[in-house]
Image (spheres, grey):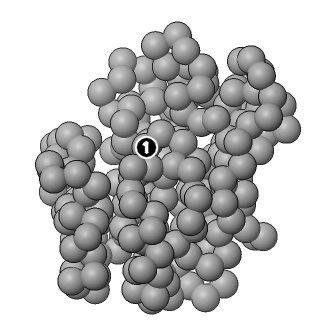
Amino acid sequence: MRKCLFLRCQRDHAPAAFRSPSCGGRVDSVGQYELGRTDLDTYDAILVSMLADQHSLIDQTPRLEAFLDRGGTLVLNGHMAYPPVAGLRPFVPQTGRGTEALTIHRLADHPVFDGVDGADLTYRRGVAGFYGRGHNPAPDGAIALNGIGPDRDPLDWVWQRPAGGTVFMHGGLDVWAYAADPTSAARMAPQLVDWLTAA
């Protein structure tokens, strides 16, 4: 069975989304500061929260890049101030104001977002901006999946690295934070795990 590794930022367990029956035991978790002592050869994907200690991740760049080089997938959330992998660039905040600057636009189909309404990403509990307030610029060759604002800046993208492996980037609140929402956005967490563990 293909497996994912979630890096915990806190002492508690992985998010409930990854402990649910829909994830079927496909996600293990380890404290972020234990990453250097963790055997990554048994995992196909690493999931990183927006709350991760980015300085600590930089210390793990050689291991993360080796993981990618062998064909792994790295899922990153949040505002990249210190990108942990070569080819990634720091977060760019939205400059516009109002709802238009925070509106989410589907740019390309992807299994993680199947059946997810853009309005459910733009608004959460009636407020715009939870899903994203800027973007981490996509590398050359990346496929933009969801854009933000009138310029449709790439908020969500997937990149097949030339050296190997895949980076899935979301420049905002963890996609699994929506798992209990009463909207179509709840589909993202289980669909992410399905995509990462598909044979």
- Asked if residue 75 is positioned above or below residue 165 in the image, the reply reads above
Pick the front one: 158 or 54: 54
Q: Is residue 147 visible?
A: no
Furthest-top residue in this view: 126
Tag 1 residue? 174
Point 38% across, 57% down: residue: 52
Q: Is residue 94 left or right of residue 71?
A: right
Residue 66 figure quarter: bottom left
- Residue at the (33%, 44%) spot, across then down: 190
Apparent side of residue 71 relative to residue 169 in the rendered image (left or right): left
Q: Is residue 74 visible?
A: yes
76 vs 193, nearest the viewer: 76
Percent x, y for residue 79? Answer: 56, 50
Residue kind at label 1, given as amino acid type: Asp
- Tell me the residue at 66%/53% (across/down): 91
Q: Secondary structure at mark 1?
A: loop
Q: Which residue corresponds to the image point at 77% horizontal and 44% vertical from the top-left? A: 153
Position in image of residue 50 (x %, y %): 44, 50
Q: Quadrant of the C terminus?
A: bottom left
**Image quarter (top left, top right, bottom left or bottom right) of the N terminus:** bottom left
Q: Is residue 8 left or right of residue 113?
A: left
Give the residue at the far right of this rendering.
151
